[in-house]
Amino acid sequence: MKAVIYQAYGSPDVLELQEVAKPVPKDNEILIKVHATSVTAGDCRMRKADPFAARIYNGLMRPSRVQILGFELAGEVESIGEKVTRFKVGDQVLASCGFKFGAYAEYRCLPEDGVIARKPLNLDFGEAAALPIGGGTALRFLRAGNVQSGQKILIYGASGSVGTYAVQLARIFGAEVTAVCSTDNIKMVKSLGAKHVIDYTNTDFTQLGEQYDVIFDTVGKSKFASCMKALKPRGCYLSAFSPGLSPVLRGLRLNISGGKAYKTATGREKQEDLLFLQERIESGELRPVIDRSYPLEQIVEAHRYVDTGHKKGNVVIQVVRP
């Protein structure tokens, strides 16, 4: 089968399309013919080994544990192991591969009790492939922040993958959403349910005098000290990425300054989270935002685009051309 391999850390040019052995499912696994995957921030960070912790996980000098990236996928069950009961051949599914990655390939084996759900009927494979990671991350953070009806939440980086899902989910939970994004994305995030939108290119939201129950930084680019001034007493600051000052020190600082909460981790992925997202998709309350779509042969170009930091929502890779 065809798969995208990387054997060195670095720029998108380290990604190479090669022929590798087709996997065979174990007794508890399903073999998925991958129709689509995506380029997530996690794929790019693992490719670049940035942060350095990626090297501790995947090899100090070169990738050794993971050589096929791809965090999420959508496809069709081609065969099943002898003990599989939840899925049958022909089922259309979407799934997170977790930190074993492996979706940049024509086939991927996953355990049937993994983070897998049936593909929503109202999504094509490309749209479905963009749901598990961005949607799941947004959902877990909003639940960790205990986002509720009537609260005011600010979402920084609202036009990215996690951000576009966070805006929609916070609205579903009944919160009043203020989105922070660039000028070009204002119309889009408003269409997702943001009541207020702040253009970070000409306005610093921390200088407006507003305070929020929850501030969710989906991209790790907000200024921590300034955000504290915009957070209500007993408020919660969520950060999908935590560069700079360590979470421990930040947590201590918050506890000293009024019992505000700081969270940068939400626990492991859960199948029930993906099922929740599937239901919201099928009800029409939630939708993936797709920026660009590339064939598998153009994976280098797709990574290069995501590296610019200007994608809107999700970038999809079509393994099987629609």
Image: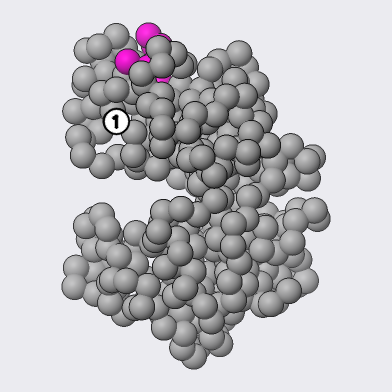
Magenta-tinted stretch = 229-237
Examine the rendered structure and indicate whether residue 215 appears above or below residue 24. above
- Identify the residue at the far front of this view: 202
Q: Quadrant of residue 31?
A: bottom right
Q: Please say whether residue 236 is one of the residues in the magenta stretch.
A: yes
Quarter of the image that includes the N terminus: bottom right
Its colouring scheme is one colour
Dot 1 surroundings within 10 Å: few (below 14), some, or many (20 or more)? Answer: few
Q: Quadrant of residue 220?
A: top left
Q: Which residue is mark 1?
A: 223
Is residue 286 or residue 65 the one in the foreground?
286
Examine the rendered structure and indicate whether residue 242 appears above or below residue 53. above
Is residue 110 or residue 40 the one in the foreground?
40
Looking at the image, residue 307 sits to the left or right of residue 96; the answer is left
Residue drawn at (21%, 35%), measured in percent from left and top?
246
On the question of residue 252 being in view, the answer is: yes
Looking at the image, residue 237 sits to the left or right of residue 147; the answer is left
Looking at the image, residue 316 sits to the left or right of residue 89; the answer is left
Q: Please say whether residue 265 is one of the residues in the magenta stretch.
A: no
Q: Secondary structure at mark 1?
A: loop
On the question of residue 73 being in view, the answer is: no
- Where residue 174 appears, as percent x and y from the top left, is 65, 21
- Where residue 120 appears, as percent x and y from the top left, is 76, 53
Dominant secondary-structure state across the stretch colored magenta: strand
Residue drawn at (20%, 35%), measured in percent from left and top?
245
- Where residue 273 appears, as percent x and y from the top left, is 60, 42
Residue drawn at (56%, 50%), measured in percent from left and top?
313
Residue type of the residue flagged with mark 1: Lys
